[in-house]
Image (cartoon, rainbow, N blue to C red):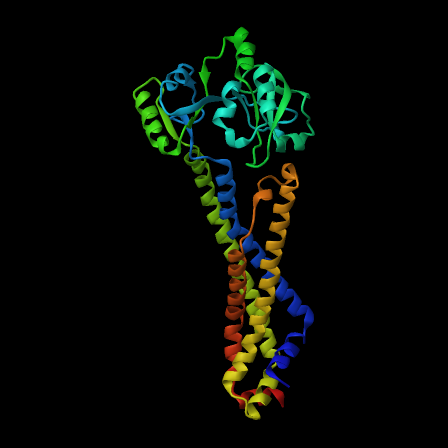
Amino acid sequence: MTYGRLILRNLTRHPLRTLLTTLSIGLSIFLVCAVLTLPAALDAVFERAASNQRISVHHKAGLTYWLPGSFVRKVHAIPGVSGINQFSWFGGIYDEPKNQFPNFAVDPETVGQVWPDYNIAPDALERFRRIRNGALVGAELMAQFGWRVGQLITLRGTVFPVDLTFEIVGVMPSGGGIRMLWFNRTYLEEAMEPKGGMKNVGMIWMRAERPELVDGIIKQVDALFRNSEAEVAAETEKAFFATFLDSLRGLMRVILIVGFLVVGAVVLIAANTSAMGVRERIPEIAILKSIGFRRGPILAALLAESMLQGFAGGLLGAGGAYAILEALRLAGKTGNTAFLGPLGGFRMSPIVAAEGLAIAVVVGIVAGLVPAWNGARINVVDAMRRLF
């Protein structure tokens, strides 16, 4: 009998025990691979959704503070800007509060200039400019609620004491994970006139004509409103969204730590299983030693068993994670973005899969090293006494 056959025979001696240990390693590696994929996947979603040529201007104290409407007119004097728009959070609710989604009052005249990368159809932009209560809706929202172009929908106001009815005039494609509703700011201003009017804006969006002009525009914006009634913070869209992403990184670190703690628990479980197997085979090890087998080959054979279990678990875990995330990514491309959300853009790289497999092999080595070492160095006389 060869060493290979001996190792396989020992692994299949208790098939249920081997299967459960392998599955526990595979599940932990699946979790680790998913967690390792999360930062890169979020970065990829962020890269698709944000631009370095678009500039956000908001109140320096935070997004909950409003800017005077006159600020919009002032930034028009800054050279090198191809488009200026404004965002005002409406906070409307469609059916239930749990289904609330971002909805903003914007200037329909410059949507195409500020967000050309959203690839909104020209005829949709034309209807948006022409129809006073028109709304542009993200493809994900259209799919989630079963809406269609031309349909009338009503949002109940939360920030503003008005309910507004909109006609869907176009769709924002799903390429960047856009899940918003935009409507004409003038429509909101008219609705607010009987209630005191609306003179402020939430934030201002600007698009530079060329990327090399961005830094200069930001400096001009900061200088223009320095020591004003409402000081502003100007930054690129990527920097703006990066602040939100940074708040998630702490959570991701916690999740990563939990994932590796799970791996540590699996190491202990696998080590206990390996120790049980070695204890059961002490008489056999004694016989092997008595007929001339040295400590090294016995240690290698015992350690190879746990390594094979780790390798098999790694293949299951890393391979399963890769297959599932790839299936989600392909499903996202077929239009299931409303159900999948950001998961439709997740993709696990082969490097992460290789890292997961390597971790699984290390788990197998660490779990089997001490039991294998103790089994290989056992005294033949003591072992024979247990046998007879």
In this rendered view, identify the residue nearer to me: 98 or 175.
175
Q: Position of residue 360 (x, y in %)?
A: 54, 64
Location of the N terminus by quadrant is: bottom right
Report which quarter residue 269 is drawn in. bottom right
In this rendered view, identify the residue nearer to me: 110 or 3.
110
| Residue depicted at 37% across the width and 27% down the height | 233
Location of the C terminus by quadrant is: bottom right
Q: Seen from this angle, which residue lies furthest bottom?
A: 291
In this rendered view, identify the residue nearer to me: 204 or 253.
204
Up the image or down, 364 lies above or below 353; here it is below
| Residue depicted at 47% across the width and 21% down the height | 86
Q: Position of residue 184 (x, y in %)?
A: 55, 17
Do we see residue 385 in this rendering?
no
Q: Position of residue 47 (x, y in %)?
A: 48, 40
| Residue depicted at 53% across the width and 13% down the height | 186
Report which quarter residue 25 is drawn in. bottom right
Do we see residue 56 in this rendering?
yes
Q: Seen from this angle, which residue lies furthest top?
A: 194
Up the image or down, 140 lies above or below 308; here it is above
Up the image or down, 82 lies above or below 25; here it is above
Report which quarter residue 131 is drawn in. top right
In this rendered view, identify the residue nearer to me: 24 or 343.
343
Q: How many marks?
A: 0
